[in-house]
Image (cartoon, rainbow, N blue to C red):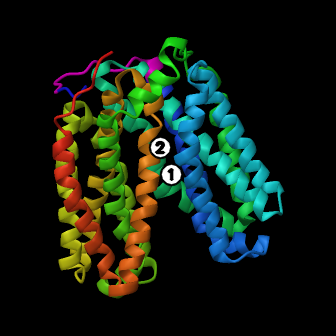
């Protein structure tokens, strides 16, 4: 439920420890997710495949998360949530170690798909646990704590892992990630509380009916459009910086760090906005995202303005993530356990679609066209978000 709050009771120390553990786990899983991107050339050379084929490792993970996450969530919803958290992290660690010991591309590809599905399962379960250990009025902030782990993984974990991979080899980087995974697994053993799964009456058809109700699908459409709009432009930000802004070399990394830091700030602030009014936060966030992309189109030749615009784009994009999760789960009502896995799936589909559409635009009209396409998608998403702001959950 979207509520306006003034003062929210602080989470007890046990809850903070639980949230910290889940945050750390998602940081590790998120680092493993994006680590391949920075090591594609190294991996392709070692496995004897082309760089585009190595890029399939990224796709396999995304497909596993988008499709496998909900399926595994459905299959495990009657189990204790602590058991699912431990199991998903443990098998994730094994999957990454399997990638280390194999010299076979197909085996690596399968392992990436499996670990992606386990990441989706972990996210759904972590959101359930996080919102169970805090007051209801702080649910948005609890969700934001989990999302912040993945955001910081992309901003800092993956670059550090890439640097390690350049020195110790890509296998060494994955061993380091697996070791960190083992540490958070150990922490989860003591710091994640037992939480019963859904009863037989809450499972099966009832979960499917509520999790995929039209009101929930409408919010998932908003989620899809948010990330399609952002990633249509962001997927090609490096060539944009080089060709339009005139930034090159190490300075490109500075701009990427600005965006990364902004996404972390957005995820943190987005939790408070979700607790304030998630529906309104989505409309405001989409408006800011669309205006950011439009400004990037018009002012892309100014290095100073581009830095400011990328910061605003990062804040708006990830600032909506907690509200999207909050609204989907709220509208699912009794189907919340399964619905927890769906925003990540919709976001991954949006990322893939945005990147594909942006690429087509570049092929036909040049690099700046990707930014224009992103702005257009954002403009379409604003009225969709406004229409969904009136939706209310149906209590059963």
Tally the marks.
Answer: 2
The residue depicted at 54 percent of the width and 17 percent of the height is 197
Q: Quadrant of the N terminus?
A: top left
Q: Which mark is residue 153?
A: 1
Residue 247 appears left or right of 116? left
Residue 50 appears left or right of 301? right
Q: Nearer the viewer, residue 287 or 199?
A: 199
The residue depicted at 66 percent of the width and 69 percent of the height is 54
In the image, the segment drawn in magenta is 4-15
Quadrant in the picture for residue 211: top left
Reply above or below: 134 against 125: above
Q: Nearer the viewer, residue 224 or 316?
A: 224
Asked whether disc 1 touches disc 2, contact meaning CB atoms under 8 Å apart, the reply is yes
List the residue tagged with mark 2.
149
Residue 13 is covered by the magenta coloring: yes
Q: Which mark is residue 116?
A: none
Reply above or below: 99 against 345: below
Give coordinates of residue 237: x percent, y percent: 38, 73
Q: Nearer the viewer, residue 128 or 223?
A: 223
């Amino acid at each position: 439920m979207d509520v306006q709050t003034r003062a929210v009771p602080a989470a007890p120390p046990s809850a903070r420890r639980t949230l910290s553990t889940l945050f750390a786990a998602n940081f590790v899983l998120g680092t493993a997710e994006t680590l391949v991107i920075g090591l594609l050339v190294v991996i392709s050379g070692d496995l004897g495949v082309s760089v585009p084929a190595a890029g399939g490792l990224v796709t396999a993970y995304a497909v596993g998360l988008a499709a496998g996450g909900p399926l595994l969530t459905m299959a495990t919803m009657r189990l204790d949530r602590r058991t699912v958290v431990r199991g998903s992290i443990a098998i994730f660690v094994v999957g990454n170690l399997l990638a280390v010991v194999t010299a076979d591309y197909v085996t690596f590809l399968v392992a990436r798909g499996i670990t992606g599905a386990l990441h989706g399962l972990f996210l759904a379960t972590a959101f359930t646990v996080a919102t169970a250990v805090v007051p209801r009025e702080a649910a948005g902030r609890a969700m934001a704590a989990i999302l912040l782990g993945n955001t910081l993984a992309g901003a800092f974990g993956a670059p550090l892992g890439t640097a390690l991979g350049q020195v110790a080899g890509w296998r060494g980087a994955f061993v380091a990630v697996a070791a960190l995974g083992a540490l958070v697994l150990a922490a989860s053993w003591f710091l994640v509380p037992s939480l019963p799964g859904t009863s037989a009456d809450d499972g099966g058809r009832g979960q499917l009916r509520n999790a995929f109700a039209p009101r929930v699908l409408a919010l998932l459409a908003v989620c899809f459009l948010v990330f399609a709009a952002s990633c249509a432009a962001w997927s090609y930000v490096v060539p944009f910086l080089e060709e339009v802004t005139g930034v090159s070399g190490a300075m490109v990394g500075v701009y990427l760090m600005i965006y990364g830091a902004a996404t972390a700030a957005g995820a943190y602030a987005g939790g408070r906005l979700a607790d304030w009014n998630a529906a309104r936060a989505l409309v405001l966030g989409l408006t800011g995202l669309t205006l950011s992309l439009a400004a990037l189109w018009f002012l892309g030749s100014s290095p100073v303005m581009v830095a400011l615009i990328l910061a605003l784009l990062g804040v708006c994009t990830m600032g909506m993530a907690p509200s999207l999760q909050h609204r989907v789960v709220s509208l699912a009502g009794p189907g919340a356990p399964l619905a927890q896995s769906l925003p990540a799936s919709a976001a991954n589909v949006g990322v893939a679609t945005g990147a594909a559409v942006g690429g087509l635009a570049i092929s036909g009209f040049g690099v700046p066209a990707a930014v224009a396409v992103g702005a257009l998608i954002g403009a379409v998403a604003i009225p969709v978000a406004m229409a969904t702001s009136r939706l209310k959950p149906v209590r059963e």
